[in-house]
Amino acid sequence: MPLRVGLFATSPRGVRRTTAGFPLQSLTLPLTLLLTSHYIKINITISIIFEVYNFMNVLLIGNGGREHALAWKIKQSAKCEKLYVAPGNAGTSLVAENVSIGVEEFEKLGIFCIESKIDLVVVGPEVPLVKGIRDFFESKESLKNIPMVGPGKAGAQLEGSKDFSKQFMLRNNIPTAKAKTFYSHQANEAVQYLDTCQPPLVLKADGLAAGKGVIITSDVDEAKATLREMLEHKKFGDASAKVLVEEFLNGIELSVFVLTDGEDYIILPEAKDYKRIGDGDTGPNTGGMGSVSPVIFADKDFMQKVEDKIIKPTIAGLKKEQISFKGFVFIGLMNVKGEPLVIEYNTRMGDPETQSVMSRIKSDFLELLLAAAKGELKGHKIEIDPNYAITVVMAAGGYPDNYEKGKIISGLDERTEAYVFHSGTKIKDGRVVTEGGRVLGITGKAKTLAEAREKAYSAVESVNWEGVYFRKDIGNDVLTLMDNKV
Ligand code: ATP
C-alpha cells in the first residue's frame, strides 16, 4: 500500500471529511522519513481530537414539534457530526437531514443505522417504544450495541398501560389517585361502581389513545354511557378493553421530566402545559396548545417532594422490578394543596413542553443523552437557564376534530425574537404547508414571563395560514399566580 500524506483542514470537524492523499514513492528517503514522522504526528493528533470530541452520527425518530426541538438542541452540540431525523418535518430539515422512514419501520430504521454508521438513536414518540423498537434492536447482532435513548417494551408499559402504571405506583408507594380497573366483560359492574363515586368522574382507557382516552365528566349518566361504549363497544379499540375509573384530583398540573439510565437520573426543567383547545381551559382535550417553563409553584420545597416521593421510588421501583430503563420518564402530576400526586407516566418527552424545556437547557444535551443511553449518567449535571420560556401552539382550524391540510404558511421568514418549532408541516412545491392538527409551536424566551409571552405572541401574529387557530391565554394563569404571590 503506498504511503499517503493527508491534507487536513484546521477545523476538527473538517478533518474527517477532507483527508486526501498522494503517493510518495518518488520522493527521497530523508523527505519520506520527515513526512512519515509528520504523518504519524498528524494521525496521532487526529486520533486525540476524535477521542476528545467523540463525533457522533445521531438518528432521531419522530416528526413532531418535540422532535424539532430535540433536533435543534442536539445540533448545538459540538459532538454532533451528522443528525438525521426519521421521518422529520419541514422544521427538522432546517437543522438536520430528514430520512423518509416511518417511526414503526424498525427493519428499515435498523438498516439505515448500519449504513449511516449511527452512534446514537433517540426515540421521540411513544408508539415505537410501546411497540418495542429497543427490543427489536437488541434482538439483532448488528444493532444491539448502538446506544438508544428510549426504554424497551417492558419500561414503555408505564405509558402504554394505565393499569400497569397504576399497579406499579401502588407497589412502589408512589402517591397517585385511587382507581379501580374494569375489563370488557365487567361493564355492568363498572357502571354500578360509578354510583359509588363522587363526581367529577374520571374514566381512562388503559392503552394509548393519542391523548383522547381520558374522559372527565360530572354527568353520571354520560359517564355510564361512555363507560359502556368504551368497554362493550371498543370506543378506543383495544385501548379501552380495560378502563380505569379514577378519583378526580383537584389541583394544578405540572410536567416533570427525568432523563435516566436506570440507575442515576437528571431532572430537566419542569413545565406546565395547556391541554384544552379553548381559552380559559375550555373545550376538548388536545395534544397540548402551549407550555410554560419554569412554573412558579414548582419551587425548591415542592420539587424536593417530587424527587423524594416520586422520582426516587420510580427509578428504584424499575430497578427492583428488573425493568431496564434508559430514556425519559415524564411525570404528569397534580399539585394538590402542596402535595404531588401522579396522574400519569409517559416514557418520552412531552409536546409542546419539549420546546420550552429545550430552550432552557444550557448543557450539551447530546452528551447527556449519550451518557443515559450508555448507562454512564453518574456524575453528570445539568445547567439550566433561569429565564422563562413559553410556547404557543398554532393549530389548524377545526383541530382537535376534523381539519384541513395543505394550507400554505406565510410569514415564516419574518425576523422575530422567538423560535419557530414545526410540528405538522411539510414542504410542497418549495413552500411550507400544514400537514397536521398542531402545526407550529412558537417559543419566546426572556428574563420575565411577561416578556417571553410578548415575544412569542408577536411572532405568532406574523405567521398565518387559512383557518389558523391558537389560544390567546397561554401563560396567563401562571402570571396570575405570580402576581398573587408578590
Ligand atoms: P396524554 O397522552 O395527552 O398525556 P393521556 O391520554 O395519557 O394524556 P392523562 O394524562 O392521564 O391521559 O390525562 C389527560 C388529562 O386529564 C390530564 O392532563 C389531566 O388534565 C386530566 N386528568 C387525568 N386524570 C385526572 C385525575 N385523576 N383528576 C383530575 N384530572 C385528571
Image (tube, grey):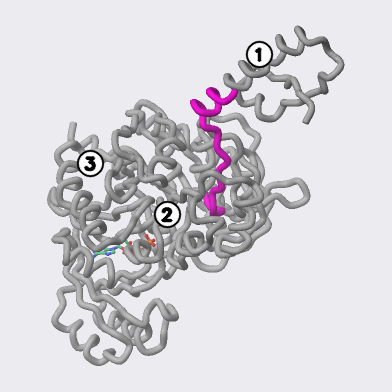
Task: State the SS at label 2.
Answer: loop
Q: Residue furthest right?
A: 26
Horizontal and vertical percent for residue 249? Answer: 19, 62
**Which is more N-terminal, label 2 or label 3?**
2
The CB of the residue at mark 3 lies under 8 Å from ligand 1: no
Q: Which mark is residue 423?
A: none
Q: Is residue 158 magenta?
A: no
Direction from residue 305 to residue 4 in the image, left or right: right
- Residue under the point 59% across and 23% down: 46
Instruction: Check residue 55 for magenta coloring.
Output: yes
Label 2 residue near ligand 1, CB within 8 Å: no
Badge 1 marks a residue whose secondary structure is helix
Give amino acid for label 3.
Ala
Residue 479 found in image quarter: top left
Of the residues under marks 1 and 3, which one precedes in the sequence? 1
The mark found on residue 150 in the picture is: 2
Residue 258 in the figure: left or right of residue 415: left
Residue 294: x, y in percent? 31, 37
Return the residue at label 1: 37
- Residue at 43% x, 60% y is 286
Q: Which residues are magenta?
A: 46-65
User: Which residue has dot 3 on it?
Assistant: 298
Disc 1 and disc 3: Cα gap in Å? Answer: 59 Å
Compared across the picture, whether 47 is left or right of 453 comes to right
Q: Which of these two is toward me, 258 or 110?
A: 110
Q: What is the quadrant of the C terminus in the image?
A: top left
How many labels were placed on the picture?
Answer: 3
